Amino acid sequence: MNITYVNTVSAEDCVKLRDSAGWLQVHPDQIRVGLRNSVYIVAAKDGETTVGMARLVSDGGYVVFVADVLVLPEYQGMGIGKAMMERLLRYIRSNLKSGYLIQVDLMAAKGKEGFYEKFGFERRPDDTRGCGMTQRLEKKAR
């Protein structure tokens, strides 16, 4: 196995990775737009097969969101997620101007919090900050 890392991923591969994690499905057109508007993408490849991906979404100012950190189940535990997170954080640091601050946010999947703590992320709530929150909105197809 020779894992390589590239900075692009197809919507189809993203769908497959989301399926492998049991995540809710998102319309492929939305995925294409989301990928196109991502500030940075890293994908792990085993030959021609995409086995992992992660991406950054940014407001261009002071907030960056880590999204879609996914590794196929049969490739988990091999350091692929770690390598992708290191690349994301290296990208953020390399674009951080002197005197600037960037808030890096993410929503960890249940049970995966410890993975992100290894990179310096802190669980919420804590003694000073409330919990992270989310809401999903959906318009049913007619």
Image (spheres, rainbow, N blue to C red):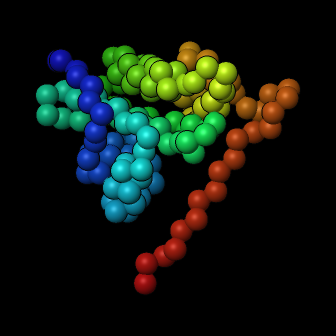
Q: Is residue 6 above or below residue 21?
A: above
The C terminus: image quadrant: bottom left
Q: Is residue 8 visible?
A: yes
Q: Position of residue 126 (x, y in %)?
A: 80, 28
Q: Residue at x 75, y 39 (%)?
A: 131
Pick whichever, 96 or 82, lies toward us. Answer: 96
User: How many numbered markers are drawn?
Assistant: 0
Q: Is residue 38 above or below residue 66?
A: below
Q: Is residue 1 above or below residue 126?
A: above
Q: Residue furthest front?
A: 98
Pick whichever, 90 or 29, lies toward us. Answer: 90
Q: Residue at x 85, y 29 (%)?
A: 128
Q: Residue at x 52, y 21 (%)?
A: 93
Pick whichever, 20 or 115, lies toward us. Answer: 115
> Residue 136 is drawn in which quadrant?
bottom right
The answer to whether 127 appears left or right of 110 in the picture is: right
Q: Position of residue 46 (x, y in %)?
A: 19, 27
The N terminus: image quadrant: top left
Q: Position of residue 84 (x, y in %)?
A: 39, 25
The answer to whether 70 appears left or right of 106 in the picture is: left
The answer to whether 3 appears left or right of 40 in the picture is: left
Pick whichever, 114 or 6, lies toward us. Answer: 6
Q: Residue furthest right?
A: 127
Q: Position of residue 139 (x, y in %)?
A: 52, 74
